[in-house]
Amino acid sequence: MHSPVRIGLMGLGTVGSGVFEILHKHPEQIARRSGGPIEIARVLVRDSNKPRRVPVPEDKITTDASLLLEDPSIDVIVELIGCPGGSVEPARSYIAGALRAGKHVVTANKEVLAKHGQELFALASEHRVGLYFEAAVAGGIPIIKSIKEALVANEMRTIMGIINGTTNYMLTKMAYEGRSFDDVLKEAQEMGYAEADPTSDVEGHDAAYKLAILASLAFETEIPVDEVYREGITKVTPEDMAYADELGYVIKLLAIAKAHDGAVEARVHPTMIPKGHPLAAVNDVFNAIFLEGDSVGELMFYGRGAGKLPTGSAVVADIVQAAQDLRRGVGGWLNGKAAVKRILSPMEVVSSYYVHAKVVDNPGVLAQIARAFGDNGVSIGSVIQKGVRQDPVSLVFVTHKVLEKNMQAALNQIASLPVVRRVANVIRVEGE
Ligand SMILES: NC(=O)c1ccc[n+]([C@@H]2O[C@H](COP(=O)([O-])OP(=O)(O)OC[C@H]3O[C@@H](n4cnc5c(N)ncnc54)[C@H](OP(=O)(O)O)[C@@H]3O)[C@@H](O)[C@H]2O)c1
């Protein structure tokens, strides 16, 4: 057995205390699997007077990051402080400082990686150390290691994921209980699934960070998070849920990335998927990632995308990997540079669409809308008309696949028709 690998743990909140608990639950097993013991040398927190749920010796707790970053006996920094208040600092600087000091770094911080990943991976490579980030995407699901290692033989074609548990919980409640967005948001907040400020989840930012990380890795190109097209779930109504059900779909917040010749598309938005699609059965706070590789074909990963122990499981796996790498004297990840791929603009993306229009109940309205679709090369797959002798009535269309540019032109034309009160919602359809 080797001498202990010493960890500097930054953050002792939900995930940090899960990591502490797991490392102390099975120390012999962890030591066996890491080639020697793992020891938590110091723990960084914001408030050293806060009562802790895990029994960390008081003399190990500090509020001074330099005691971790500048201690040459600390081999691995585990960054679990996150981005409180939406700021990447000090997490970004701590990670960079640790890499510069020649320490391996394990992080669960999707926001820092999505915004500063290129810079941090370059630093890791320059200093020949590892930057491990399994827990940054889909919590307990081992998707990063799978793409990096188990699926390395493949050229990846498609990634489609439910990678935000909060919105999946909310959409599940809306679909099965017919409740409104506001109503289920309140419940999700009471249950601790949604933050007091839910913007990052419900507007799709959290899923966009994770997709930028996943797709950059899978398609071997930088995908700046600002270039991920993003739409949240705030406009999804119980009415749309009911129409989706009638048409044979469910609505999920999907993160989608697809490879094209020399280009990549990356988008996060509410999506209708057929009830028979494997992702349609992923409910509540569960996450799932559906992948398609050129050799392996279709694969799906399913599990808990958040929580103390599931996320702790992914962080501890990275700590064990870092310890093994240290003990074998290897650092970092060996991967050459691929050609940079262009990110498609939203207007270049092809999809089918659900369009819900509120119209006056006059004969010939359907024909006028159908003409507007036809004028712009949009072909209609199915139509539902609901409500008679009321104003307005609902007309619902599902189109065949069409370029977004044509769809937007058709929607502008439809919205300007005097018989159309408003276009109530437009939702992309995938997975057919
Ligand atoms: N929660 C999950 O299920 C989950 C899942 C996947 C990924 N993640 C990621 O894991 C990371 C940690 O999340 P979490 O839920 O564990 O967060 P959390 O419960 O809010 O805990 C954050 C911890 O960091 C400490 N901290 C915050 N700012 C600090 C600063 N400036 N200096 C020193 N310490 C600081 C806090 O100290 P005090 O305790 O003294 O306040 C606390 O111990 C985030 O990047 C998050 O995105 C979380």
Image: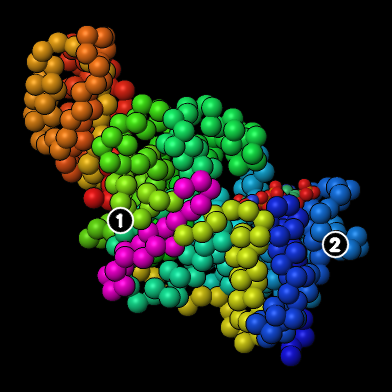
Q: Is residue 34 left or right of residue 363?
A: right
Tally of numbered discs:
2
Quadrant location of the N terminus in the rendered image: bottom right
Residue at 35% in and 41% down: 250
* Mark 1 Cα shell of 10 Å, populated few (<14), some (14-19), many (≥20): many
Q: Is residue 299 magenta?
A: yes
Residue 212 can be seen in this image: no
* Mark 2 Cα shell of 10 Å, populated few (<14), some (14-19), many (≥20): some
Residue 82 position, x and y percent, is 65, 50
Residue at 81% in and 65% down: 42
Foreground residue among 73 and 258: 258
- Residue that mark 1 sits on: 258
Residue 146 position, x and y percent, is 45, 70
Q: Amino acid at mark 2?
A: Val
State the image quarter where residue 346 is shown.
top left
Q: Which is the main secondary structure of the residues drawn in magenta?
A: strand
Residue 414 can be seen in this image: yes
Say whether mark 1 is within 8 Å of ligand 1.
no
Q: Secondary structure at mark 1?
A: strand
Q: Is residue 16 left or right of residue 328?
A: right
| Picture disc at residue 56 | 2
State the image quarter where residue 240 is shown.
top left
Residue 64 position, x and y percent, is 82, 56
Q: Amino acid at mark 1?
A: Lys
Magenta residues span 283-301
Residue at 64% in and 39% down: 191
The extreme right residue here reads 59
- Distance of label 1 from label 2 (alpha carbons): 45 Å
| Dot in front, 1 or 2 | 2
Foreground residue among 94 and 379: 379
Is 91 placed above or below 57 here?
above
